[in-house]
Image (spheres, grey):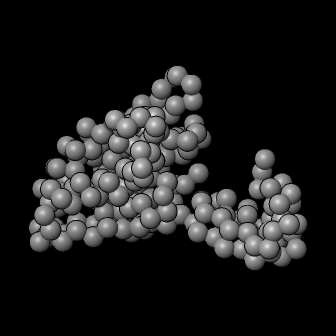
C-alpha cells in the first residue's frame, strides 16, 4: 500500500500524522496529509549525525563506540542496519590520532558479521530490500567518483530467501563537505 492510500484510509479518523523515516517518503507523507483535510504533520527524517573524536580520546574505546553508533544499534537482541535516526553517519577524527584510529577501525570493521538480526551472534542486520542494497552500492560508487577512498567494502548478496547483506564499515575516507554522501540520508 502506498503513502496516499494509507493517509486516505486512516486520515479520516486521525487528528495528526507522525512519520519517522527517509526524506523521500516524508515528502510523500506531507503531501498526502495536506490533501487529506490538512492534518497536522510531524516528520523525523533521516539525518547525518556526526561523532567528533579528539586527540585526547582513548582510540580503542572510540573505535568500538564509533562502530557501534554507525552499524550496531543493538536494542535487546536485535541488530539493525544503521536505520536508527540517531545512528552516526559521519566520523570526524582529529589529525593527531587519525592514522591510528583509521587502522584500528578498519581492522575491527572487517571482523563484523552481517546477517539475520534475530541471530545474537551477528553485529549488523541485513538490508531491508534489494532496492536499499542497490541504493547503498550506488552511493559507494558516487563517493569514489567524488574523491573518497573505500576503506572496507566486503559486500555479500545472499541468495537464500530475501536476505540482502552489505558490510562497508567506515567505508569512505576524506569525503568533502560538498559531497552528496555528507548530505544525503540513505534511509529507504
The answer, for residue 136, to whether it is visible in the render is: yes
Q: On the image, which quarter does residue 175 sit in?
A: bottom left
What residue sits 54% from the left and 54% below the top? 187
What residue sits 53% from the left and 63% below the top? 46
- Residue 141 in the image: x percent, y percent? 44, 45
What residue sits 50% from the left and 41% below the top? 127
- Residue 29 in the image: x percent, y percent? 73, 64
Q: Is residue 51 above or below residue 76?
A: below
Q: On the image, which quarter does residue 111 sit in?
A: top left
Q: Is residue 163 above or below residue 141?
A: above
How many marks on residues?
A: 0
- Residue 1 in the image: x percent, y percent? 78, 47
* Left-right relation of 120 to 96: right
The answer, for residue 99, to whether it is visible in the render is: no
Residue in front for this viewpoint, 164 or 173: 164
What residue sits 58% from the left and 66% below the top? 45
Q: Is residue 40 above or below residue 157?
A: below
> Of all residues shown, which one is farthest toward the front?
76
- Residue 144 in the image: x percent, y percent? 38, 49
Amino acid at each position: 500500500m502506498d503513502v496516499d492510500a494509507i493517509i486516505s484510509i486512516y486520515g479520516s479518523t486521525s487528528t495528526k500524522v507522525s512519520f519517522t523515516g527517509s526524506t523521500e517518503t516524508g515528502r510523500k507523507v506531507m503531501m498526502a496529509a495536506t490533501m487529506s483535510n490538512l492534518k497536522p504533520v510531524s516528520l523525523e527524517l533521516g539525518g547525518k549525525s556526526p561523532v567528533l573524536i579528539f586527540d585526547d580520546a582513548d582510540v580503542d574505546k572510540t573505535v568500538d563506540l564509533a562502530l557501534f553508533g554507525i552499524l550496531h544499534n543493538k536494542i535487546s537482541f536485535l541488530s539493525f542496519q544503521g536505520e536508527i535516526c540517531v545512528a552516526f553517519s559521519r566520523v570526524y577524527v582529529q589529525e593527531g590520532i587519525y592514522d591510528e584510529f583509521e587502522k584500528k577501525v578498519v581492522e575491527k570493521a572487517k571482523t563484523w558479521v552481517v546477517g539475520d538480526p534475530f541471530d545474537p551472534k551477528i553485529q549488523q542486520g541485513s538490508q531491508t530490500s534489494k532496492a536499499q542494497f542497490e541504493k547503498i552500492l550506488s552511493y559507494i560508487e558516487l563517493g569514489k567518483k567524488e574523491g573518497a577512498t573505500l576503506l572496507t567494502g566486503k559486500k555479500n548478496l545472499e541468495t537464500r530467501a530475501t536476505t540482502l547483506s552489505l558490510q562497508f564499515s567506515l567505508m569512505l575516507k576524506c569525503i568533502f563537505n560538498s559531497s552528496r554522501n555528507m548530505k544525503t540520508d540513505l534511509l529507504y
